[in-house]
Amino acid sequence: MKILSKMTLIAAGIVAGLGLVSCDQKKTLRVYNWTYYTPKTVIAAFEQEFDCKVKLTEYESNETMFNKLINGGAKSFDIVVPSQDYVSILLKKNMLQPIVQEKFTNRNKINPDVLAKITYDPEMKYAVPYYFGAAGIAVNKTKAPADYERTWNIFADKRFEGHASMLDDYREVIGDALSYKGYSVCTVNDNELNEAISLIKNDWLPNIIKFDADGEGKDFASGNLWLCQGYAELFFGEVPEEKWDETIDFFIPENGGPSYLDSMCILKDSPNAELATDFINFIHRPENYAQFLDFFHFPCYVNLEAEKHMTSTPMYPASAMENCELKHDLGADLGKYYQQWEKLRIQ
């Protein structure tokens, strides 16, 4: 190893220090988003255009995100991407600041049908839609019978016994049963909830081998599971693309079901509201938003102009989500769902 003289080391230190000062002068935008939910190519392009750095931190659930924010983490981030019920919670707790509207020039790119579903912030003062999605049903066509029912009640089909799974998510599973019965996925009516629980307990549960939030995609791809309720990317991500057509039938029942809307929000303590709005606006340039959709093979629903820039084939058509209903924050009434779910889980 070459030994440097003392003067050389001092000079090198000065240069390094100048370099650090130069880097520190760049603004840093701190983004807190779901795991694998932010295209790196878009981040790199934003950093170059706005001469800044983006520090991305990821989370795997709304609960994880919220717990971090309320336990001192809110000052650590500028942008967060909660789902609709947690947007409502953050608004009620006064944890968000308004979008800088004059910088949000791409607001006309947001699908009016999406805005019509938003009751907590329909004018996008605090939350700009990022992605609207829904869980559906995946059938392994190499294992399943040919004449299965294309509704949520497919889980009552005895031919799938021991080879079916549903998400470990009580709003989703109970919401599916409520949708099948023709009720709102946000109902707090005890009679309607009891009907849904009875359907799950007596007709669906005997065929379900497990409630799973993580591994069902791999079990589906291996052929252990023939019928799953879940998010399309779980299954398409595990099955090789050349086998998608022969293996996967993914659909959302015509009468709809529970859906989610993740939105970009600026935290109240963020000192970078203008840069944060620039980032939100940048994401919704159609050519940038298309990169996000292409990465996941997501359907184009939130930003309709992005579709002409897409190069991928979506896993399912956007029209399949038209009858889906957002799971809104139910406040204290959410306990009704949780109590019913706990009873189901100990069967």
Image: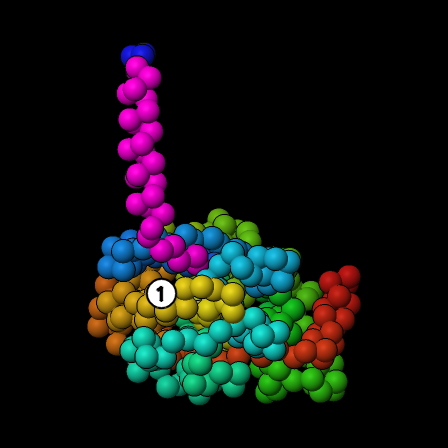
Q: Quadrant of residue 299?
A: bottom left
What is the total number of numbered labels drawn onto the structure image? 1
Depth check: give the residue in front, 17 or 267: 17
Estimate the x, y position of residue 122 in percent, counting from the top left. Answer: 46, 85
Q: Is residue 125 above or below residue 275?
A: below
- Residue at 33% in and 50% down: 25
- The answer to whether residue 107 of the structure is visible from this angle is yes
Q: In this view, does 302 lie above or below 119?
A: above
Question: Is residue 20 part of the magenta span, yes or no?
Answer: yes
Residue 107 shown left or right of residue 188 in the figure: left
Estimate the x, y position of residue 280 in percent, counting from the top left. Answer: 36, 69
Depth check: give the residue in front, 169 or 140: 169
- Residue at 32% in and 79% down: 102
Q: Quadrant of residue 248?
A: bottom left
Depth check: give the residue in front, 242 or 126: 126
Residue 128 shown left or right of residue 11 in the figure: right
What SS does tag 1 mark?
helix
Quadrant of the drawing holding the C terminus: bottom right
Look at the image and give the residue range highlighted in magenta: 4-31
Quadrant of the drawing holding the N terminus: top left
Residue 263 shown left or right of residue 300 in the figure: right
Estimate the x, y position of residue 194 in percent, counting from the top left. Answer: 74, 81
**Residue located beneath label 1 in the image:** 275
Question: Is residue 329 part of the magenta span, yes or no?
Answer: no
- The answer to whether residue 175 of the structure is visible from this angle is no
Q: Quadrant of residue 202?
A: bottom right
Q: Which colour scheme appears in the figure?
A: rainbow
- Residue at 33% in and 52% down: 26
Would you call the spot at circle 1 few (<14 residues within 10 Å), some (14-19), or many (20 or more)?
some
Estimate the x, y position of residue 192 in percent, counting from the top left. Answer: 70, 85
- Residue at 45% in and 64% down: 271
